[in-house]
Image (spheres, helix red, strand yellow):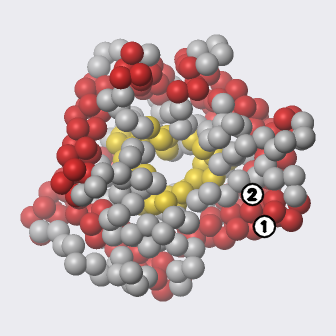
Amino acid sequence: MKRRDFLFGSASVALGSLLVTRLSAQANETKKGLKLGLTTYMIGSQWTLPQLIQHLPPLGILAVELRTDGKHAHGVELNLSKAERSEIRKQMADSPLQLLGVACAEEYHSPDPVVLQKSIERTKEYLQFCADLGASGLRVRPNNFPKDVLREKTLDQIAASLRALGATADALNQELRVEAHGSVGSLPNMEIIAKKADHPKVRVLLNSNFQDVEGEGLLANLKKVGPYLGGTVHINDLTSKKYAEAKFYETQFAFLKSVNWDGWCLLEIGDKPDDEARLGELKRQRERWDELVSSPTA
């Protein structure tokens, strides 16, 4: 697919639907509290931007984080020109779908200083990319603890890298959203990283991993990172039996409400073989979302 296909794909949205969803989006922008969006890591990865704009707002999914480095159909990649970035910005601004940010795979745990510096410099490029697109933040991640390196040293290195990048994020008015990812990404570790980074633009992004229940339990772990949360969290299959039995989302959503968190919960669920199945799954997730956020225990 040519890089401009994502801008001028064949998918179109009926004018009446656009007007309805635009009004819905405007109402949602003023709504406080938990709101539902999508990250395109898996489901959504096969849709162009016009298709995302077509499919998501009618389901009440009014914001999106676009995964990059994955050769996704929307084609939103770092090598786009300034003009192409401007076209995307305009396309999203004219649509009912809000572009929250970009999700990249940059990480800062490598003991190789050359690898580490390359990741830091590339992150700066991504922060500029997000600003050019009119987004509000960039998802990055910790990942694994390298062998033969003290864990405390790795956490210190990640935090120092993020603190240095916070200045760039601040200058570009971007959140640097650090996803609780990989073996480093336990919530107690994320608290350590956020404290040591000590920058208002370096924020923790919950990934809703089941490991969040370990140790002192989900609520205690959420309280550790509560002061450092940014504007997005990732959620996965809201209908999962394991999560339901643990009342994971009831607990997480109740906590977010208790701290007056005002942000977007981005669905990160597996892809389906065709659009009918994808839309059906998103509808199912939306229905479960409505049940959870309206529950008195959430």
Is 2 left, or right, of 67 in this rendering?
left
Q: Nearer the viewer, residue 89 or 61?
A: 61
Q: Is residue 106 visible?
A: yes
Circle 2 residue = 165
Q: Position of residue 98 (x, y in %)?
A: 37, 58
Front residue (pair 209, 259): 209
Of residues 236 and 93, the one nearer the viewer is 236
- Please identify, in this view, whether the residue under mark 2 or under mark 1 is nearer the observer: 1
Residue 209 lies, in percent from the top left, at 53, 32
User: Which mark, residue 118?
Assistant: 1
Is 36 left or right of 138, judged from the image as shown?
left
Q: Report the residue at 36% width, 76% height from top.
A: 6
- The location of residue 82, given as percent across then percent down, is 53, 83
Q: Of helix, strand and loop, which one carries label 2?
A: helix
In the image, residue 282 above or below residue 274: above
Quadrant the C terminus occupies: top left
Q: Amino acid at mark 2?
A: Leu
Dot 1: within a 10 Å radius of its alpha carbon, few (fewer than 14), some, or many (20 or more) residues?
few
Direction from residue 298 to residue 186 in the image, left or right? right
